[in-house]
Amino acid sequence: MMDFDRRKEQPIGVFDSGVGGISVLQELLKVMPGENYIYLGDSKNAPYGTKPLETVRQLTFENVRVLLDQGAKGLVVACNTATSAAVRLMRGMYPDLPIVGIEPALKPAALQKEHPRVLVMATPMTVQQEKFRQLMARYEDKAEIYPLACPGLMEFIEAGDLESERLRDFLRELLGPYLDKGLDSVVLGCTHYPFARKMIRSIVGDAVTIFDGGEGTAREMRRRLAAADLLNPSEEAGWVRFENSVATEAELALCQRLLKQEI
Ligand code: DGL
């Protein structure tokens, strides 16, 4: 009995290829403020989205192992790329562990109104994976969907650049071809992109709705932990510990800054 209650106090492990998953961590903290969290970013090996599938799988398995070795009671794969590459296999490896991944929030965007025009921004790997093709197939007759691979975008966020002119130029060029399509919504299908939301918004305009999967993912984790009776009953705020494969002070300071960044 005692041991089981102890398990509830164990942290939730949150993993991303870099600092992007902190956008999901923000949502987790809103939904479950009493939980403890270890956030592990693999910035040394980022980006994942332009690497071969097998490499992303191995890196994800290794990093997840690190979180489990530290006693994570559940796992949030706060990376669309790692989710599409590895989450199904991980569920097979750890059948008793609550594991929640993230995928582009295409559903709410596609059902937002009658046959909307939806731009989905994600990494090259995410848009190429079978998981995304299946997701797209589900909503193809309900919406006009434009998948857009955005290599190079996550690197701005990794460098802590959320508002430079260089980022604006990059986004203008990337989004330019879609601006006359009458977009109804943009889906941020990579967890780094919410940190560029303000700038994306300034380019696509206020009439476009911007979706991301962070909140849905956080709620799903709460459901899974509740179902496993693993929610931390503590009424006090929990702790957050950042770890990164780039273990410099500057990297950890960037993590703290992004945790407070309004998205
Ligand atoms: N943050 C990641 C995602 O949600 C991936 C970025 C990358 O490593 O390419 O897809």
Image (cartoon, rainbow, N blue to C red):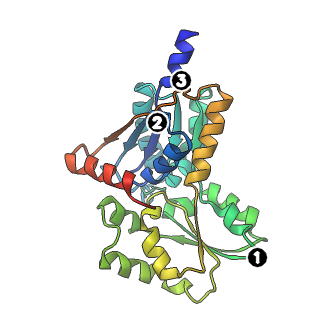
All told, the count of numbered labels is 3
Label 2 amino acid? Gly
Residue indicated by mark 2: 13
Q: Nearer the viewer, mark 1 or mark 3?
A: 3
Label 3 amino acid? Lys
**Cα distance, mark 1 to mark 2?**
38 Å
Instruction: Identify the mark at residue 115; answer none if there is no mark.
Output: 1
Lower position in the chain sequence, tag 1 or tag 2:
2
Lower position in the chain sequence, tag 3 or tag 2:
3
Q: Quadrant of residue 226?
A: top right
**Cα distance, mark 3 to mark 2?**
13 Å
Lower position in the chain sequence, tag 1 or tag 3:
3
Q: Residue at x 60, y 80 (%)?
A: 207
Q: Where is residue 82 in the image (x, y as percent from the top left)?
A: 50, 49
Q: Residue at x 61, y 32 (%)?
A: 225
Label 1 amino acid? His
* Label 2 element class: strand
**Cα distance, mark 1 to mark 3?**
44 Å
Q: Where is residue 17 in the image (x, y as percent from the top left)?
A: 41, 50
Q: Which of marks 3 and 2 is in front?
A: 3
Looking at the image, which is closer to me, 23 or 146?
A: 23
| Cβ of mark 3 under 8 A from ligand 1 | no
Instruction: Identify the mark at residue 68; answer none if there is no mark.
Output: none
Q: Does residue 183 appear left or right of residue 190 in this picture?
A: right
Residue indicated by mark 3: 8
* Label 3 element class: helix
Q: Residues within 10 Å of mark 2 (few under 14, many from 20)?
A: many
Q: Position of residue 238 (x, y in %)?
A: 44, 33
Q: Quadrant of ligand 1?
A: bottom left
Q: Does residue 164 appear left or right of residue 141 in this picture?
A: left
